[in-house]
Amino acid sequence: MKTFAEGFRQFDDQDHNIYDGFAQLSLSPRTSIQAEFRHKEFEVGDIAHLFLDPYWDERQWDNRDMLRLGFHHSFAPSSDLIGSFMYLESKPSFHNPIYDTMTEETGYGIEAQHIYRSQYFNLVVGAGHFNQDKNETTIISGARYPSNYSTEHTNAYAYSYLNYPENVTWTVGVSADLFNGGSLTVNTQQVNPKFGVTWNLFPGTTLRGAIFRTFKRTLLTDQTIEPTQVAGFNQLFDDADQTDAWRYGVGLDQKLTEHLFAGVEYSQRDLDTPTISQTPPFALTSTGAHENLGRAYLYWVPHPWFAIGPEYQYEWERNDRIALNDTVNLETHRFGFNIGFYHPSGFFARLRPMYVLQTGEFRIYPWNPITSADSNFFVLDASIGYRLPRRLGLIELVARNLFDESFRFQDTDPRNPSVAYQRMLFGRWTLSF
């Protein structure tokens, strides 16, 4: 697969080349193995979109090889064993007008998991071990500053899903992380309780709630076989490594009629991330942050070919140690409307108008004053495509920000923007054999 984009502003370009091979073999009706090899090359400029971002000549390169092996064995209809092995070699480098870095990285990860199912409860138990070695050189004004460090991370977990009474599913679990090393030389032992409940109050009505703690995993390829959600609430986020986070959430999903669905969800995350202070004596400290996430939706299927409905998303992010963050306080409201057409022949078309309102307080550098700013704008995304017969893949033409609106906006994940800052047209195709 190849992706290339020149970008809609200076220094905002990217070029990706990905080569992937995958094979799966059934050794018996109960046992199967799989293997995947992926080679990725990419070069990107300053693609992070911040509200007050001073765009400059920033560039990243990487040449990465990843091998993944998988194993599955079924002891019985109620008992399964899953195994995973990953190996990674990577050579990222980075440049901006202030400094350059060159890195050589190798790592591996081993995971195993057992799944047991019964009439009244299910049990998922697993463990993993991850190792990374990095050799990094930073060049500032011609002077070279080498650094070498290793990361050892071992985790174990158990999730039980209890059905009692019949219309209630309780999620009770725990995970443990043992982390050693990393760029900050941190040694951590953390226990993470997991609790969730899914209650079918009435036919068509589902109430969900969850409270759980997480530790930002060492993920070589952003993949894991550990359960990724508790009662429908995601527990894996792209936080900084070693982030300690609690999440509290509640949600309600309602089937109003045979063709009308509605729901609402609200959660809060409290984060604590190890970091180095930017003032003497440059000691190990932590950065606290808080995130509130809300969502409401209404989906209507008036005809098997059509699906429409409004959606609202709310995000509020606050950082405690403002001297260490670009974003001090950020509040975002998104009002969207989804319109979809799906023909049995495989042809489909989608429209998504969205209005965004954002207010925030920002600091570009620690020595600069805090700046308050706000923005509101309207964007329209559209796409048309065709699904190939027999699930062989799809072809799609996508237009983002169709009316070419200009605005200021900061995503929660600035390096993966969800909104196009100028009109963007691109095509994509996926083939499966």
Image (tube, grey):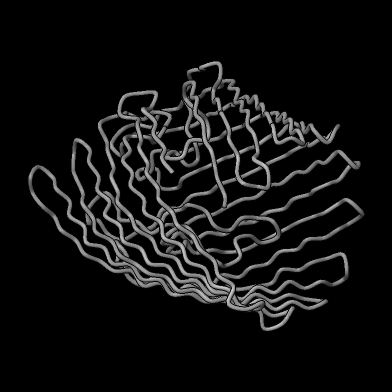
Q: Is residue 4 left or right of residue 407?
A: left
Residue 198: x, y in percent? 78, 61
User: x, y percentage for residue 224?
Assistant: 52, 64
Q: Quadrant of residue 12?
A: top left
Q: Nearer the viewer, residue 201 or 283?
A: 201
- Which residue is most to the left? 142
- Residue at coordinates 31% horizontally, 40% vertically from top-left? 43
Q: Please provide percent x and percent y for residue 330.
A: 51, 36
Q: Say above or below: 88 vs 74.
A: above
Q: Which residue lies at the image location 58% right of the left edge and 74% below the top edge?
A: 32
Q: Is residue 143 left or right of residue 324?
A: left
**Residue pictured at 35% horizontal, 37% vertical:** 15
Please tell me which residue is depicted at 71% across the width and 34% down the height of the picture. 311
Quadrant in the picture for residue 243 = bottom left
- Image-based side of 2 in relation to 296, left or right: left
Viewer-closest of 149 and 17: 17
Near-viewer residue (181 or 94):
94
Say if residue 187 shows up in the picture.
no
Number of numbered markers: 0
- Can you say whether 314 is above or below 270 in the image? above
Q: Is residue 3 above or below residue 11?
A: below
The quarter of the picture where the N terminus appears is top left
* Relative image position of residue 402 (x, y in whole percent): 56, 19
Residue 178 sits in which quadrant? bottom left
In this rendering, does residue 317 appear at all?
yes
